[in-house]
Image (spheres, rainbow, N blue to C red):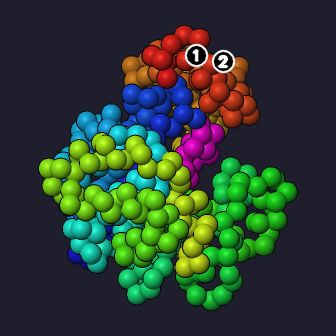
Amino acid sequence: MNKDTYVLIMAGGVGSRFWPKSRNQFPKQFIDILGIGKSLLQLTYERFLKICPNEQIFVLTNESYAGLVADQLSGILKENILLEPSRNNTAPCIAYATYKIAQLNPDANIVVAPSDHLILKEDVFLDKIQVALGFSTANDALLTLGISPTRPDTGYGYIKYQDGFEEVKKVDAFMEKPVLAKAEEYLASGDYVWNAGIFIWSAVSLKKAFEKYAPEIATLFESGLPCYNTDRESEFINTKYPTSPNISIDYAILEKANNVYTIPADIGWSDLGTWASLHAVGEKDMANNMINLNKIHLKDTSNCIIHLPKDKAAVIRGLDNYIVVDDGEVLLIYPKTEEQEIKQVAKDIVSEHGSKYA
């Protein structure tokens, strides 16, 4: 394992499209959503233990989830749980971690990854990460692991890259989520990948990029250098972090920089962003139903995803292409074809019945 390799796992989101299972107090990344006895965060952490030791893995989360992270990741160091006092998008939290890690090791190479994605081809993923780390060590470059698209999906941003024989491709442009016709065009062209939010770069390169393209963020987190890795760090972050711009790393840096590269990869990836995406990758019965318990009895039911509390028995008949989720307080029965409405439905329930349902 390389002493200069560090990992930052982003675990501060709410996963509102997985409502009602994913809630403010216990969001998606902490749930055993796959029914295998481990949360998505635990799977992500264990995956990265294969490229660096636990003391070089940091988890950035909202301060309200500190206890959940510590409980689920038995090997993580307390000082490696970084707490954001406010949700200011990805650029500030990546900057915070980068300046902190760079003070520990100026030669650090950092892998940034979401906590709640599924990666089925783990060996391929780890190989691609090593290629990226080698490239970021040798070059002033910002890399993203691009997902080779398997369908014309309109739910992801795309990255256009320059064709060539090299494994590492120069990025031409970041593209917003497209309409279907444009997504079909991207897929047919063969030189686009999905933007999965998995990044690799040296601390030196990213700090230079912040200084050039997002100087306000650079100035703010540079001012914390006397505080990082001391007992003054948390006071500095609690005071200054909420004043940072609310902006993604894509908008702040990657769409402006001219030293961005991608490595196209087929890693069996899903962002598990919706119930339908979970159904697509999960184990299903002969009628294409995905269920999380053996106490669920189905009759004349097909193409459904059914997620119930651990000790609940259920008999369901006559459903096709539905989402059925019971978290104890909230029961959702919704057509899978209309699941894009769930986020708004959750807001409506909270507005009408109170924040306990958020």
Against 250, residue 28 (above or below) is above
| 277 falls in the magenta region | yes
- Residue beneath label 2, please? 317
Spatial distance from mark 2 to mark 1, Cα to Cα? 32 Å
Magenta stretch: give its range: 265-281
Against 121, residue 12 (above or below) is above
Whether pointer 2 and pointer 1 mark residues with C-beta atoms closer than 8 Å, the reply is: no
Against 37, residue 333 (above or below) is above
Residue located 67% across and 76% down the image: 172
How far from the left and from the top, in percent, is residue 142? 49, 74
Disc 2 residue type? Arg
**Total marks in image:** 2
From the viewer's perspective, tell me whether residue 68 is left or right of residue 127: left
Disc 1 residue type? Ser
From the viewer's perspective, tell me whether residue 183 is left or right of residue 11: right
How far from the left and from the top, in percent, is residue 275? 59, 37
From the viewer's perspective, tell me whether residue 90 is left or right of residue 237: right
How far from the left and from the top, in percent, is residue 68? 29, 36
Against 317, residue 104 (above or below) is below
Which element carries disc 2, helix, strand or loop?
strand
How far from the left and from the top, in percent, is residue 269? 54, 58
Query: Which disc number belongs to residue 351?
Result: 1
**Foreground: 222 or 121?**
222
